[in-house]
Image (cartoon, rainbow, N blue to C red):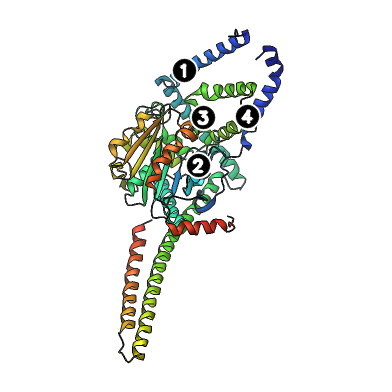
Amino acid sequence: MNPLLRLALLPRTVLETTNILLTAEDAPIGVTPRDIVWTHRKTTLYRYRSSKRTHDVPILLVFALINRPMIYDLRPGNSFVEFLLDQGFDVFLLDWGELDDSDADMGLAEFVCDEVDGAVRETIRASGASEISVIGWCIGAALSAMYAALHPSAPIRNLVLLTMPVDIRDSLYTTWIGRETFDVDEIADEAAVVPGPVVDWANKLMKPVTNYVTTKRRLFQQVEAGTADRVAFQAMNRWVSDNPPFPSKAFREWLTWMYKENRLVRGRMELRGHRVDLGNIDHSVLVVTAGADHIAPRHTTMPFFDLVSSDDIEHIDRPGGHIGLMAGSKAKREIWPDIVAWLAPRSGPVPLEESEAGAASDAAPASGH
Amino acid sequence: MTQPTPGDRARQQYEDVEKKTAAAMERLVGSEAFAESLAMFVGNVTALVRVADLGLDQVVRATRLAGRRDIARLGRQIARTEDKLENVLVVVEGLEAELALARRERDEARGRLEGGESQGESQRDSGGTSTGAPRRARAARTTRAASSDVLTRGGSDESGR
């Protein structure tokens, strides 16, 4: 571009870039129509109904405790939920909600044995299916794996684990948290919940220049070149900066058991007196790792394969970051179809009478929730 | 091919510097020294927050208004009640399922019974004897109801929540 023209357009570019950044909070995310199926404390289970359901086994989506699950349904046209519905799956989403001081007593056992357990039960109940598929992401994947390990007879047919930390000895988080001087107990004793912005700050600190400077500089250049995708940037920006509070008990247990004591991989994790033995997992398992993941690097997930006893286990590794892999602009073409291609033959067709009843109910006016 | 303008060159140089700074910062935050400083920083901030929180809470309580801790305590109480309600709900849902099963079996048995009765009537009409089907069906229903009670109790015990 002509330097003079660039200079002349500078005020407009600055104005538009600032506007995109400042109004990101208004970006609509998670807009796919859904029903509330079950609530317990702050947890909500949502159901997204497919109008062309072709698979009998519904999908339960479980996300991490430190971000909103809306990343699964980021924006129209780039939503994993929308994609799954289009592929004929009935989808359920577990939302941990806005946890506050009164949830300080929520630890890993409460999330795994109460909330995930309740979500599995209610998914079965609402869908009428006899088994479900669980897709977990990040901490959500670890919680799902813990649940499957603790409940070998739970009605889970397939387990899809996305960028899951398992053996995190050699990671940046462990360098920060694993040391003696990082007093997890002091923080957990003081704060009923670790505020969302603190978690966000810690995550961004892992790549400070990239997160605080490069992203904004790139946006500025894209605005200048007229190639900025306002909707995509704002949706992702809103999601990234919206971290829910992390209950102190779960914070203490997750950091101590996973980063300081590495209990999961050593088989020493216990929830409500029961050992979490990953060897109990004999479901069909798909593990997805991201080549440029700095939060749960690939090598921290790989030990999982030696621990589980599944015969039907597959691994997909793709270039991409911890979140970008599943929510980036290329995800719809490069990773979602692979996940569906793995799930579809393991999810059975919808029984004939049910699909006919579904077609009839689709034709009837929907009841609002 | 067009020659890069001074502006483009400056921009390229800035991007190179940014890239090198990003790599250097990532090395820095990954170092033991940074981790040690971070641990101490977090410890200090936590201690300061504790002092500020306690002070603020005392001030609010002195005005006889509910402080954050009081509200959190109330919230926990509500959460505990909800936990208990959830446990009751699980038991009720289990009972509901058992009841539905028992009803279905009863209806099936009744259907069979009515079929048997009409058969019996037609047999009586044609001068035949009763088959004794009603008594057998009632006995079967009683047995199933008893075993369903046992299952329900076992089910609620197993939930153990």
Amino acid carrying label 4: it is Leu
Pointer 2: what residue? A83
Q: Are the numbered discs 1 and 3 placed on the same chain, yes or no?
A: no
Q: Mark 2 or mark 3, which has the lower sequence index? A: 2
Q: Nearer the viewer, mark 1 or mark 3?
A: 1
Secondary structure under tag 4 reads helix
Q: Are the numbered discs 3 and 4 placed on the same chain, yes or no?
A: yes
Residue at point 55%, 15% (across, down): B15
Q: Residues within 10 Å of mark 4 (few under 14, many from 20)?
A: some
Give the spatial CA distance, label 2 vs label 3.
31 Å
Residue at point 43%, 41% (across, down): A340
Give the spatial CA distance, label 3 vs label 4.
18 Å
Q: Nearer the viewer, mark 3 or mark 4?
A: 4
Q: Residues within 10 Å of mark 3 (few under 14, many from 20)?
A: some
User: What's the chain of the residue with tag 3?
Assistant: A
Pointer 4: what residue? A21
Pointer 1: what residue? B23
Q: Are the numbered discs 2 and 3 placed on the same chain, yes or no?
A: yes
Amino acid carrying label 2: it is Phe
Mark number displayed over residue A201: 3
Where residue B106 appears, as percent x and y from the top left, is 38, 74
Q: Are the numbered discs 2 and 1 placed on the same chain, yes or no?
A: no
- In the displayed structure image, the side of residue B42 where residue A315 appears, left or right: left
Q: Residues within 10 Å of mark 1 (few under 14, many from 20)?
A: some
Q: Residues within 10 Å of mark 2 (few under 14, many from 20)?
A: some
Where residue A336 appears, as percent x and y from the top left, is 46, 37
Q: Nearer the viewer, residue B145 or A268?
A: B145
Q: Nearer the viewer, residue B46 or B116?
A: B116
Where residue A110 appears, as percent x and y from the top left, is 41, 47
Q: Quadrant of residue B58?
A: top right
Q: Is residue A48 in view from this perspective?
A: no
